[in-house]
């Protein structure tokens, strides 16, 4: 269960990294342009003219949102890893107890 959660969360985290990089490239391109430049946004199969400042604000908002989502997923990854470590420790303790019981039983049977 924990491995599936970790795998799913890690995959989502990677997708967010890709989206963040794409948006940073768009931001860099917008930063190079003059504020009077004509900007288009791809919506479905059509390019729609968009206000330059609105486009810049939208990209900045997307970057902020994606960064927040990355932090949230990193927290989830840490939680899952912590739970997995706790379970490993619990299993290790149970294995030690079983070994001690088996040693004790073998000594009693002799």
Image (cartoon, helix red, strand yellow):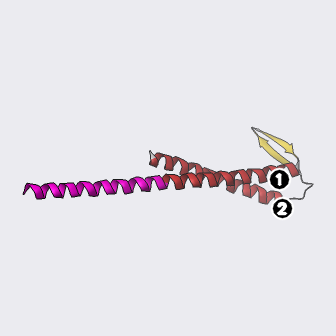
Label 2 sits on a secondary structure element that is helix
> How far from the left and from the top, in percent, is residue 35?
90, 56
Q: Is residue 19 visible?
A: no
Decide: is 53 above or below 32: above
Where is residue 18? Give x, y as percent. Answer: 64, 53
Residue 1 sits inside the magenta stretch: no
Q: Depth check: 66 or 18 in front?
A: 66
- Of residues 47 and 95, the one nearer the viewer is 95
- Gap in angstroms between the C-alphas marked 2 and 1: 11 Å
Front: mark 2 or 1: 1
97 vs 46, nearest the viewer:
97
Q: Which residue is mark 2?
A: 32
Q: Which residue is mark 1?
A: 56
Q: Quick one: which residue is furthest to the left in this view?
A: 110
User: Could you tell me which quadrant the N terminus lies in?
Assistant: top left
Label 2 with label 1: CB-CB less than 8 Å: no
Tell me the magenta residue range. Answer: 81-110
Q: Earlier in the sequence, mark 2 or mark 1?
A: 2
């Amino acid at each position: 269960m924990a491995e599936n959660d970790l795998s799913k969360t890690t995959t989502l985290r990677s997708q967010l990294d890709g989206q963040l990089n794409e948006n940073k490239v768009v931001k860099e391109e917008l930063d190079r342009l003059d504020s009077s430049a004509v900007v288009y946004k791809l919506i479905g199969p059509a390019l729609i003219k968009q206000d330059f400042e609105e486009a810049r604000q939208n990209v900045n908002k997307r970057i902020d949102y994606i960064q927040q989502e990355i932090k949230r997923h990193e927290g989830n990854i840490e939680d899952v890893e912590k739970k997995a470590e706790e379970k490993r420790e619990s299993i290790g303790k149970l294995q030690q107890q079983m070994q001690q019981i088996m040693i004790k039983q073998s000594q009693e049977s002799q």
